[in-house]
């Protein structure tokens, strides 16, 4: 069974910083892509940032230049330092991974989500 466990969310003032982390655990054969999505109340879930196993990255337009995604492949962990936060960044942040297991092959997985709240 694969699990994605997020940490690092919380409450911060505008202009502040937070760092999200997500660890993938279980019978993982290989990880193709890991990333972060977010969803604010009344909105659709949107891409924040993603990174492939060879380090190619993709960012949502609203976070470019402020967030930087990285991974530690030895720990199956993805990090998202977030700087210059604004109230518009307030949302539940979800870790996502596309990975392969011996039993199920390549599949997508989601974490439970972590709340990020930015006060003005």
Image (cartoon, rainbow, N blue to C red):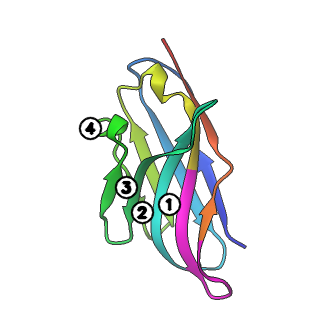
Does dot 2 land on a helix, a strand or a loop?
A: strand
Name which of mark 4 and mark 3 comes first in the sequence.
4
The residue carrying mark 1 is: 77
> Mark 4, mark 2: which one is toward the viewer?
4
The residue positioned 63% from the left and 68% from the top of the image is: 25
- The span picked out in magenta is 95-107
The residue carrying mark 3 is: 70
Name which of mark 3 and mark 1 comes first in the sequence.
3
Are circles 2 and 1 on residues that touch, CB within 8 Å? yes
Q: Is residue 99 magenta?
A: yes
The residue carrying mark 4 is: 65
Q: Residues within 10 Å of mark 3 (few under 14, many from 20)?
A: many
Q: Residues within 10 Å of mark 1 (few under 14, many from 20)?
A: some
Q: Is residue 97 magenta?
A: yes
Query: How far, Cα to Cα, is label 4 from label 3?
Result: 14 Å
Name which of mark 2 and mark 1 comes first in the sequence.
2
Residue 16, visible in the rendered structure:
yes
Are circles 3 and 1 on residues that touch, CB within 8 Å? no
Q: Residues within 10 Å of mark 4 (few under 14, many from 20)?
A: few
The residue carrying mark 2 is: 72
């Amino acid at each position: 069974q694969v699990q994605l466990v997020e940490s690092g969310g919380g409450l911060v003032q505008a202009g502040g910083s937070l760092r999200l982390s997500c660890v993938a655990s279980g019978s993982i054969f290989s990880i193709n892509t890991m990333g972060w999505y977010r969803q604010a109340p009344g909105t659709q879930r949107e891409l924040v940032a993603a990174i492939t196993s060879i380090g190619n990255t993709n960012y949502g337009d609203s976070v470019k230049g402020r967030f930087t995604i990285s991974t530690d492949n030895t720990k199956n962990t993805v990090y998202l330092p977030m700087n210059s936060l604004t109230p518009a960044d307030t949302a539940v942040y979800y870790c996502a991974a596309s990975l392969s297991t011996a039993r199920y092959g390549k599949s997508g997985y989601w974490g439970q989500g972590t709340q990020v709240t930015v006060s003005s």
